[in-house]
Image (tube, grey):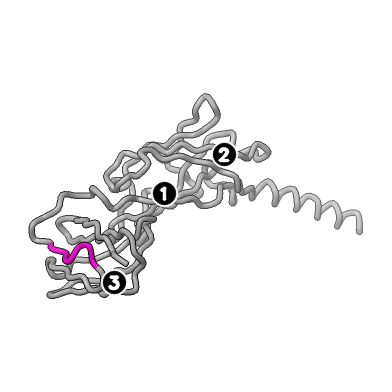
Amino acid sequence: MKKLFILLAIVFSVFSFSYSQICSSITFTASPQNPTASSEITLNVVLNCPDIAWTTGDVYIWMWGNDDASSANGEWSASEETHKMTKNVDGSYTFVFTPSSLLTGGTLPLSKIGFLIKAKNGTGDNKTIDQEIVISATNISAMQKDLTVFPNPVSSVINIDAENSSVLQITDMTGKIIITKVLENNNQIDMSDYKAGVYFFVISNDQKVETIKVVKNK
């Protein structure tokens, strides 16, 4: 009986190991270096896990955006062929996409993209650890005359004159969201406690997304 128990334990351990293999060593590059939501991004990924079998076969990308924006990932257990990565001669993988087309469903402008690489049809937890691409707030759209942000540079209080019900999102240079709020008449933001540096004011409504670079003085 004891031998049977040991044998079952070994079989269970082997099965669990093969069913869930997470690749924790991954390197990637995204081109261009400072992509916007409308950029065509070429993502190149190297999976540094030679001892994990699934990383050498067909792999698929699983993506998500901030504010619950999501792509047409399909079901975890039924990989979408549109998310299949192209395997290169050197063993790396490539995926080309445009964030604004692929990631939909969120109510705020994209500021980052999360992704992982997974085995075909999502066998267990055969995947990589989560990765992130920061989306630049600049050059999303041309500035419109009906938007005014002043003074700029600013030391304390900044005024925002924009259409009612627009959504303001302030991000720093790394893409970190500092504040999100719905704008009404005579909007003011007290930036006295903000660190000196560059911030992006992303203001959006149903028709457009506008971005202004704001410099915070000491």
| Badge number at residue 47 | 2
At x 28%, y 53%, the residue is 137
**Disc 3: which residue:** 191
Instruction: Say whether residue 153 is magenta.
Output: yes
Q: Quadrant of residue 109?
A: bottom left
Q: Which residues are magenta?
A: 148-154
Give the number of the mark in front: 3 or 1: 3
What amino acid does circle 2 point to? Leu
Q: Residue 43 in the image: state x and y as whole percent.
A: 42, 38
Q: Disc 1 or 2, which lies upstream in sequence?
A: 2
Q: Quadrant of the N terminus?
A: bottom right
At x 21%, y 57%, the residue is 212
Dot 1 surroundings within 10 Å: few (below 14), some, or many (20 or more)?
some
Q: Disc 3 or 1, which lies upstream in sequence?
A: 1
Q: Please name whichever residue, 176 or 163, is drawn nearer the observer in this view of the structure.
A: 176
Secondary structure type for disc 2: strand
Dot 2 surroundings within 10 Å: few (below 14), some, or many (20 or more)?
some
Secondary structure type for disc 1: strand
What amino acid does circle 3 point to? Met
| Badge number at residue 133 | 1
